[in-house]
Image (cartoon, rainbow, N blue to C red):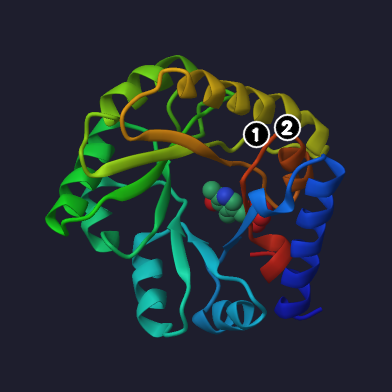
Amino acid sequence: MTIAERVKETRQKIYNAAVAAGRNPDEVSLVAVSKTRPAADIIECQAAGQYIFGENYVQEFAVKAAQIECPLEWHFIGHLQSNKVKNIAGLVTLIHSVDRLSLAEEINRQWGKLGSNCNILLQVNVSGEKTKSGTTVDDSIRLVRDISQLPHIRVKGLMTMPPFFEDPEEARPFFAELKMLSEQIKEEKLDNVEMQEISMGMSGDFEVAIQEGATLVRIGTAIFGSR
Ligand SMILES: *Cc1c(COP(=O)(O)O)cnc(C)c1O
C-alpha cells in the first residue's frame, strides 16, 4: 500500500472508532508522525489530505521544514531540550511534550520575543515508568498552576505515552487516568489553561485511546511503515 492509501485507511479507522464510541469524529484529529521520514513522504501524505505532522527531533525537523513548501501544520512531540527551543520558535503550532517549568519558561521567552503565544500540552507520565519523560500525576497540578502564570503560553491539554503493550487493552487504564486528570485540572479554572485537547494513542492503540477520550492521536508506523 502507498502512503496515500495508508493515511486514508487510518483516517477511516479513526472515524469508525469515534462513531463506535458515540463521539463526534470531528473531535479527533490525526497527527501524522513523520520522524525519520524524508520530506517526500510528508508531501505525499499532505497531497492525500493530511495537514498535521508531528516531529521528534529539532535538527531533523528544521531540515525538513525548510524543504517543504506545501501548507501544513507542525507539532513538536519529542523530548525537548531548553537550549533547542529557539530553533522551533514560531514554526510549530503545538508542543505536546512540555514536562517541566524550566522548559515552559524558555518557550515563554522565545515566543514572547516573536510577540506571540505558544500552544502547549503537558506531558504526563501516567505509568510512572522511569524511562519515560513527563511530569508525574502528583506534580502535574502544581506544574500547570506555575505555567499558567507565563503570559506567552496557552495550555491546551495533556499528552501521555503509556508503556508498550502487545494488547492495547492494557493501555486503557493509563488513557482513562489522563482523561480524569484533565477534568481535574479543568476544575481549577486557571488563566491561560483550557484543557480541550487530550493527545494519546499511537499506531497500536489509538482505537482504545479514542474510546477513552483522545482528541489527538499520534500515528507514525501505520501510515509511513516501520522505522
Ligand atoms: C514515534 C512516536 C509516535 C508514533 O508511534 P507509532 O507507533 O509509530 O505510531 C507517537 N508519539 C510519540 C511521542 C512518538 O515519539
**Local SS, label 1:** loop
The answer to whether mark 1 and mark 2 are in CB contact below 8 A is yes
Q: Quick one: quadrant of the N terminus?
A: bottom right
User: Above or below — where is 197 with respect to 72?
Assistant: above
Task: Indicate the quadrant where residue 149 lies.
Answer: top left
Position in image of residue 173 (x %, y %): 72, 24
Q: Nearer the viewer, residue 101 or 193?
A: 193
Residue under the point 16% across and 50% down: 112
Position in image of residue 200 (x %, y %): 62, 41
Residue under the point 60% across and 21% down: 180
Q: Residues within 10 Å of mark 2 (few under 14, many from 20)?
A: many
Res 171 label? 2
Check disc 1 and give the amino acid type. Answer: Pro
Disc 1 marks which residue? 163
Check disc 2 and give the amino acid type. Answer: Ala
The numbered mark, 1 or 2, whose residue comes first in the sequence reads 1
Residue under the point 63% across and 22% down: 177
